[in-house]
Each structure stands twice: as structure tokens, then as C-alpha cells.
Image (cartoon, rainbow, N blue to C red):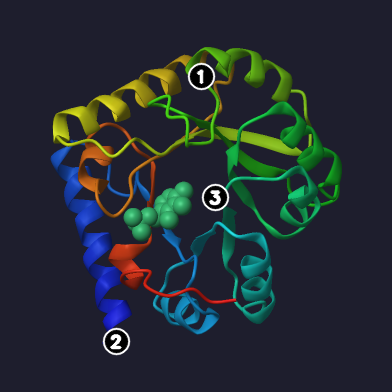
Amino acid sequence: MTEIKKRLSTIVQQIRDAEQQAGRPEGSVKLLAVSKTWPAERLRQLAEAGQQAFGENYLQEALDKIEQLADLSIEWHFIGPIQSNKTRDIAGHFQWVHSVDRLKIAQRLNDQRDPSAAPLNICIQINIDEEDTKSGIAADELNALVTAILPLKQLKLRGLMIIPAQHDSDEQQRQSFQKARALFEQLKTLAPDVDTLSMGMSGDMPIAIQEGSTMVRIGTALFGERNRQIS
Ligand SMILES: *Cc1c(COP(=O)(O)O)cnc(C)c1O
């Protein structure tokens, strides 16, 4: 087995173990492979090992890889900050967007999505620890944004995405995830079909799963340290 295949099976096993310890059904947590900075060839190896969903942060880098890997049936997720002049390419080339954080972006994605294609799956990003440096809406803005997004027919609201602050203790980390979980439950009263709570990265995956994550976004633990940039 190649190194990357070993890492994939280790992560999948860790997810299954965390599901079981949390008393959650097997398969209730999906793995998104976060492949920013890694060349298309590494993604291909992982896709050939069975990984289907890949997350990218930088649009131009992602478009290059999408083209190079067009022969594979990869599900592409955009997870980076979104500038409004980038929405057309995002709407045209991705199946998911995790980082919707304002109505203008949602409207543009909706208007630019091909109506004959499947609706674009979106998550609303919440700035759960109210950090100045992070994207995402404040918790008390959620209901208004959801109400405005639900009528947009080319979008399918799937849930929430959060990136917690770096906390010193597991307990503080857990509290960020618990806040997100509570908001997710609140969201279900407005949008009963939502099914995705995108939280948990290489450093905090088991806690995120214990606290209700349905999709973990894993980069470093799969691909290694991002010590170099491509482009
Ligand atoms: C880079 C990134 C990840 C993956 O982080 P790792 O710590 O490498 O697992 C997850 N989510 C987002 C939004 C990212 O930008």
C-alpha cells in the first residue's frame, strides 16, 4: 500500500471508532479530503484508493486540478473565503460550497448555477468563536440569512460549517463544537431537511465527532504537512 492509502485507511478507521464511541451509526460522518496546495497527482492516488470528496480553498488552483482530474468522478467542495467575482466559476465547477457567509454570495451562486444542473449544495459558515480574523456570520444573523436563502431554487441548503478558534484545552474546543451543534438544531426548525454539520479538522476530529459533526475536513493527517505551495 502506498503511504497515502495507509493514511486514508487510518483516518477512516479513526472516524468509525469515534462514531462508535459516540454511539452514532456507522457511516454517519463523512470524510472530506482537504487537498489545498497538493498537486493533482496526489489527489488521483487518493481517489483511486476510494476517496470521492475533495475540498479546495483557492479557486484557480482548484480549477486546474478539476480539469486535470476530469476523468475521475470526484465531488468537489469549495471551502475557502469567497470573493464575489469568483462565484461564477464556483457555481460552475463545484458540487458543494461550505463557506457561504452573506446573502450577496448566495444570490450570485444561485443566479450563476446552471438551472439544468443539480442544485448547488451549500453550508453557511458561522464564526463560532467571534474571531476578527475569521469569515462567517455571527450566530444571531443565522435565521435572517436562512430565511433569505431558502427560496433560492438553484441552491440546496445542507447545513453549517465552522472553524473553531485554536483553544488550549479540549474542554474549550468542545464548547465551540457544542455551540455549533445547538445552532444546527436551531437551523432544523427553519430548514428541516438540513443534514450537514461540517466541523472537525486533523487536530480535533474525535471531539468534533463526539459533538455531532457529520463531515470532517481533513488535510494534514491525510496528505502530510503543507510545507510547500504550488501554483
Ligand atoms: C485547510 C483547511 C482544513 C484542513 O485542515 P488540516 O488541519 O490540515 O486538517 C479544513 N477546513 C478548512 C476550511 C481549511 O481551510
Q: Earlier in the sequence, mark 3 or mark 2?
A: 2
Q: Is residue 3 left or right of residue 62?
A: left
Contact, mark 1 vs mark 3 (Cβ under 8 Å): no
Residue found at the very far bottom of the displayed protein: 1
Q: Secondary structure at mark 2?
A: loop
Which residue corresponds to mark 3? 79
Q: Secondary structure at mark 3?
A: loop
Residue 2 circle label:
2
What amino acid is found at the position of numbered circle 2 in the picture?
A: Thr
What amino acid is found at the position of numbered circle 1 in the picture?
A: Leu
Residue 24 appears in the rendering: no
Q: Would you identify the image quadrant in which residue 42 lies? A: bottom left
Place of residue 24 in the rendered image (x, y in percent of width and height, measured from the top left): 24, 37
Which residue corresponds to mark 1? 187
Q: Is mark 3 within 8 Å of ligand 1?
A: yes
**Which quadrant of the figure shows ligand 1?**
bottom left
Residues 22 and 123: in front is 123
Residue 107 appears in the rendering: yes
Place of residue 119 in the rendered image (x, y in percent of width and height, measured from the top left): 73, 44
Residues 61 and 205: in front is 61
| Mark 1 nearby-residue class (10 Å; few <14, some 14–19, many ≥20) | some
